[in-house]
Image (cartoon, rainbow, N blue to C red):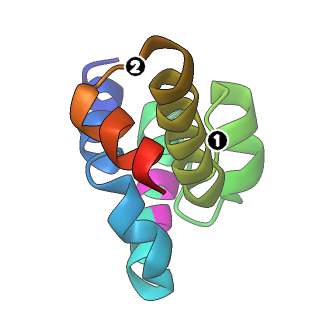
Amino acid sequence: MLASSIVGSRLDYCNSVLRTQQQQSSRVQRVQNCLARVVLQRRKSCHAQPLLESLHWLPISHRINFKLATLAYKIQPTSQPTYLHQRWAIN
């Protein structure tokens, strides 16, 4: 659980930047796959997709889209954070 929370928070850092950089995104996906293997104590040769599903973790590309969609949802109805709401209203 400790490894998951420490590394997981680092995976979410700067998601919007990673969305535009496919090469960096694939590197982060490999880190997430490795973390899933460590958490579930599997071999390096074990396929990562079933492990991610058993941990209920989204792949990095879906995780990035989820975080951006959540941020956009929070901007509209609540007007929070203010600087993003003002920027959204201009466009």
Determine which of the numbered discs, if any, sits on residue 58 in the image: 1
Q: Is residue 44 left or right of residue 8?
A: right
Contact (Cβ within 8 Å) of mark 2 with mark 1: no
Q: Position of residue 80 (x, y in %)?
A: 34, 20
Residue drawn at 44 percent across, 45 percent down: 88
Quadrant in which the N terminus appears? top left
Residue 31 on the magenta span: yes
Residue drawn at 55 percent across, 16 percent down: 77
User: Which element is circle 2 on?
Assistant: loop
Q: Nearer the viewer, residue 59 or 4?
A: 59
Give amino acid for label 1.
Leu
Residue drawn at 58 percent across, 28 percent down: 73
Against 37, is 4 above or below? Answer: above
Q: Position of residue 76 (x, y in %)?
A: 54, 26
Against 42, is 70 above or below? Answer: above
Residue 46 in which image quadrant:
bottom right
Magenta residues span: 29-33
Q: Is residue 50 left or right of residue 77?
A: right
Give amino acid for label 2.
Ser
Please tell me whether mark 2 or mark 1 is closer to you in this view.
2
Against 28, is 49 above or below? Answer: above
Q: Is residue 6 shown to the viewer in this render?
A: no
Residue 7 on the magenta span: no
In the image as oriented, which residue stretches furthest toward the top?
A: 78
Neighbourhood count class around disc 2 (C-alpha, 10 Å): few under 14, some 14–19, many 20 upward: some
User: Which element is circle 1 on?
Assistant: loop
Determine which of the numbered discs, if any, sits on residue 83 in the image: none
Neighbourhood count class around disc 1 (C-alpha, 10 Å): few under 14, some 14–19, many 20 upward: some
